[in-house]
Image (cartoon, rainbow, N blue to C red):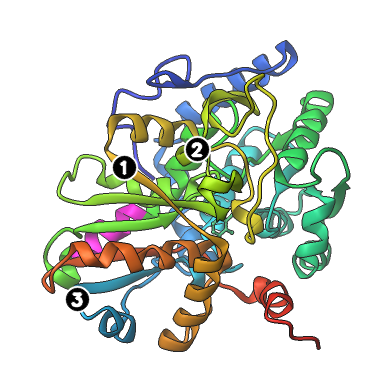
Amino acid sequence: MTTNKHNWPDKDGFFGEYGGKFVPETLMHALEELEKTYNNFKDKPEFKEQFYKDLSEFVGRPSPLYFAERLTNHYGTGSIWLKREDLNHTGAHKINNTIGQILLAKYMGKERIIAETGAGQHGVATATVAARLGLECHIYMGAEDVQRQSLNVYRMKLLGAEVHSVESGSATLKDALNEALRDWVTNVDNTYYIIGSVTGPHPYPMIVRDFNSVVGEEVVAQSKDLFNDMPNAIVACVGGGSNAMGIFYPFIDIKETRLIGVEAGGEGVETGEHAAPLNDGTPGVLHGALSYLMQNDSGQVKATKSVSAGLDYPGVGPEHSLLKDSGRAEYVAVTDKAALKAFHEVSELEGIIPALETAHAFAYLDVLMKDFDSSANIIVNVSGRGDKDINTVAEIDGIKF
Ligand SMILES: *Cc1c(COP(=O)(O)O)cnc(C)c1O
């Protein structure tokens, strides 16, 4: 967990001009209470100790920084290293944040947990920590995603959570988020809302970033150990932006390291059929924060398109908008097609089936590796494993079971 080294977010929750708290009056008090509790809580030695103990004993941290030998040979330049968040308990980086937030919820005396989920990974990660502490758990999930990720839905149920299928709007992540916020407004007294990415109103983008920063902190230490230098580049996929923010954050002042976020290009950014707000969006308010957003001229949120449920979101965390404008991080997009190709390639070359989200980060290596000579060290954040995506990919490949 990182303590704030930068002058953002400010006291109103702004990262530069982005972020803030654009919520109904009824939630203002809850957000202020959360912020106050978090600020008191995060530097307490007993909390930090418990957080790192849980990450070690329950999640299996630290995750390895692993040399991808055949992928490296495939590109014939530089060394490619994989930060293995796919090896975490529940299969993705999302558990880092839920472990932290459930400790906060318990500390605040809340007995009911709610969350939204896209790919289902955050829902599983939340249901997992709620089960571990014996707390009632409700997960909101778009009906479309319930279809695409039926295995994760069953997994959440096995863990004792109630899954609410959301039919409104495009029936994906943004609609699930709306529904979760609605629940929170109604039940705020006994309910803790665990947001799953660096999105939503302040203080969530800060809290989720801090908990996921354990990933970047480990990478700083592992880079010193393994190649005695800082990496030349770190590549991570960006949906809401939590796996990217978690690995980027400790590197913001390490200027020699390029930080590259890869968005979902869907059919291609130029077609408008994508989920890449940092590449093709404008600042607007969604789910309580101002950030780059896919919206039309009258400010209505546009439909998104991505093969990957976890990246299928029209907004992005406000800190990424700041990093984009300042130029500290670069944001690119790759198409569904390129991501699927990478999904197969990495599986065959490395014996690691990556999540479809993560496959977007891998796909960008095709472009990126041309920038480097053989002395370079490039890190890919393997945000999660692909077991949950096998049905989706099989269907695209025309395979029936
Ligand atoms: C949820 C998810 C993502 C996208 O969310 P971020 O907040 O952008 O990290 C990426 N990869 C995996 C495996 C996920 O489960």
Image coordinates for residue 295, horizontal then vertical, percent: 62, 29
First in sequence: mark 3 vs mark 1 = 3
Q: CA distance from mark 1 to mark 2?
A: 16 Å
Q: CA distance from mark 2 to mark 3?
A: 31 Å
Residue lying at 47% horizontally and 88% vertically, measured from the top left: 348
Query: Where 226 falls versus 280 (above or below)?
Result: below
210 sits to left or right of 138 = left
- Marks 2 and 3: which is nearer the front? 2
Q: Residues within 10 Å of mark 1 (few under 14, many from 20)?
A: some
Query: Where 32 falls versus 155 (above or below)?
Result: above
Residue lying at 73% horizontally and 82% vertically, measured from the top left: 398
* Residue of label 1: 329
Query: Where 119 falls versus 369 (above or below)?
Result: above
First in sequence: mark 2 vs mark 3 = 3
Residue lying at 41% horizontally and 45% vertically, measured from the top left: 245
Q: Which residues are magenta?
A: 216-223
Q: SS class of the residue under badge 2?
A: helix
* Residue of label 3: 77
- Marks 1 and 2: which is nearer the front? 2
Query: Where 3 falls versus 22 (above or below)?
Result: below
Image coordinates for residue 346, horizontal then vertical, percent: 45, 79
* Residue of label 2: 280
Q: Would you say residue 255 is visible in this rendering?
A: yes
Q: Residues within 10 Å of mark 3 (few under 14, many from 20)?
A: some
Q: SS class of the residue under badge 3?
A: loop
Residue lying at 65% horizontally and 21% vertically, measured from the top left: 299
Q: SS class of the residue under badge 1?
A: strand
